[in-house]
Amino acid sequence: MVLDISYSVIQVTLLSLYVSGCATFLGSAIGIPLGALIGLREFGGKGLLKTVTYTLYGFPPVISGLVIYYLFSRAGPLGSFGILFTPTAMILAETLLVIPLTTGITISSVTEVDRSIKDTIISLGANRRQSVLTVLREAWVGVVMAAMIGFGRCIAEVGAAYMVGGNIQGETQVLTTAIMMETRLGRFDYAVGLGVVLLGVAMAVFLFLRYLQEKEVL
Amino acid sequence: MNQTQKILIAVAVVAVLVVSVAAGLVVTQKKGSLLLATTTSTQDSGLLEYLLPVFEKEYNCEVRVVAVGSGQALEMGKNGDADVLMVHSPASEAQFVKDGYGTNRTSIMYNWFVVVGPDSDPAGVKNSTSAVDAFERIYDNGTAGKAKFVSRADNSGTYTKELSLWASVNSTWTKTNVSEWDSSWYLQAENGMGAVLDMCEEKNAYTLSDDATYYSRVEQELIPHLNITLTGDAKLKNQYSVILVNTTLWPHINKTLAKDFLDWITSQAGQDVIKSYERYGKQLFTPNAPGYTTQAIQLGTSAVVTSAVPDKTRPGPPPCPG
């Protein structure tokens, strides 16, 4: 199918990858250490914290979008940054969606591994630091999976991207918001075409990551 | 896997990241750029795609469009999130300017609303004498269980117009009142115009639509059973205006370019571009900036209305407070 549209599908696709990639990176950089910390330490209220984290797996994108919109609107507390309707705002909104996923899955992974091997490695004479590192290494597959799920959530998400990005052509238009716009315009064939591109891109990314995992780069 | 392969893959990953970051930076770093908050109908009708490149070329700048409902567009102006607004919600616009959030409100063009309904026309809207009469018939038949109406219910300019028509039928029918009507006949979609038209097609319902979106849906053969049941009433005129956001409240706004845009779109050149925009074999918008001279306009099905004269009765921009 030839897409007779005024914007570049390649640019839209690249922006989708850029926004989702950055959000996944930020969300992992915050969520994974946080999850490891919560998972490996004992403290009061840990159960509650875990419940809250797991509940936030379903954190609605529109709420995340709304939070960022209010914070970064010129009339909002952080308005002077002027980032509303830029890719940066979209990245922040989607980072909020990734953090609970990476945190929660890391908690589960390290808790699981912790239980099964901690005693063994301590009995083998490992100190606290060595045991934490070993647990993290063993839990790594789960942690990478968390990042991948986070990426999947970002690239498929539309509510937050539309709200704080504004679907500005050539600037904040990503695949999902373009699909929404095409549907609104009644150009269902274009919308379906873009949908195929979206699925293709997501699949390519996951295959690539799987390949890296198999080759033990990740 | 050996060390070299690992390094190669790592380099590839980094390269992809760098390229995508660079791509992101390239699209975000623009010279003279103007953020235009507007209603979905100007984008969905294809007008902006036709109009803006002319301005962008002449002024060597970039216009970034955020297309939302008129209500949200005004809210964006109020919060300083846009430089200039192009909206069609006269009462809210007047209030917006009166409250000091905007200046230089100027009419630029209009098109027409149409009352759209199913083939069978169960409320007999085709026989109605006016828009108010049509809405009364829809209400009577709706409450009697014979007809349905789908409302945008979304703070758009179209919804504002719908509310004003209900209020013309009966002055006690306020927004609160209308929103409590029985959903067995009055469906509040909270959705865009295109989606609402699709809903009407499915549910054999009436709605109020702008003609541009209606014709585009017809052309795409998505609504074969919906017809225009009423058009041409002066009450169905859909006036678009441009408003500058108050730069005293929001100093970061691109004041010069916003004013350039207003001056250009109300100039002979800008108005001529609006006039020359045709789709579905019809001129979709009639320019009517103050001082613009129009000839007799072919309006297709709306030709019964002969009020194609510049709207000079509109009050000039009030002084900017503060």
Image: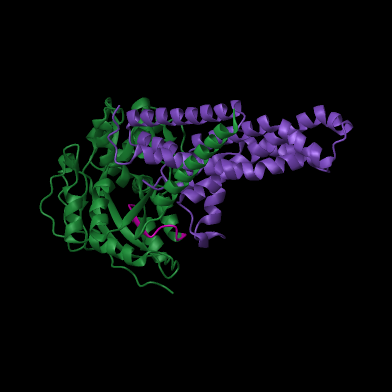
Chain colours: A purple, B green
Is residue B67 or residue B52 the one in the foreground? B52
The secondary structure that dominates the magenta segment is: loop
Quadrant where the N terminus of chain A lies? top left
| Residue A161 position within the rendered picture, expressed as x and y whole percent measured from the top left | 48, 43
Q: Quadrant of residue A211?
A: top right
**Span highlighted in magenta in the image:** B79-88
| Residue B288 position within the rendered picture, expressed as x and y whole percent measured from the top left | 20, 56
Would you say A73 lies left or right of B238 here?
A: right
In the image, residue B159 above or below residue A184: below
| Residue A116 position within the rendered picture, expressed as x and y whole percent measured from the top left | 81, 27
Q: Residue at x 43, y 44 (%)?
A: B154
Is residue B217 or residue A62 the one in the foreground? A62
Is residue A218 or residue B197 the one in the foreground? A218
Can residue B191 be seen here? The reply is no
Q: Residue at x 66, y 30 (%)?
A: A141
Task: Find out whether residue B67 is within the magenta segment.
Answer: no
Q: How many marks?
A: 0
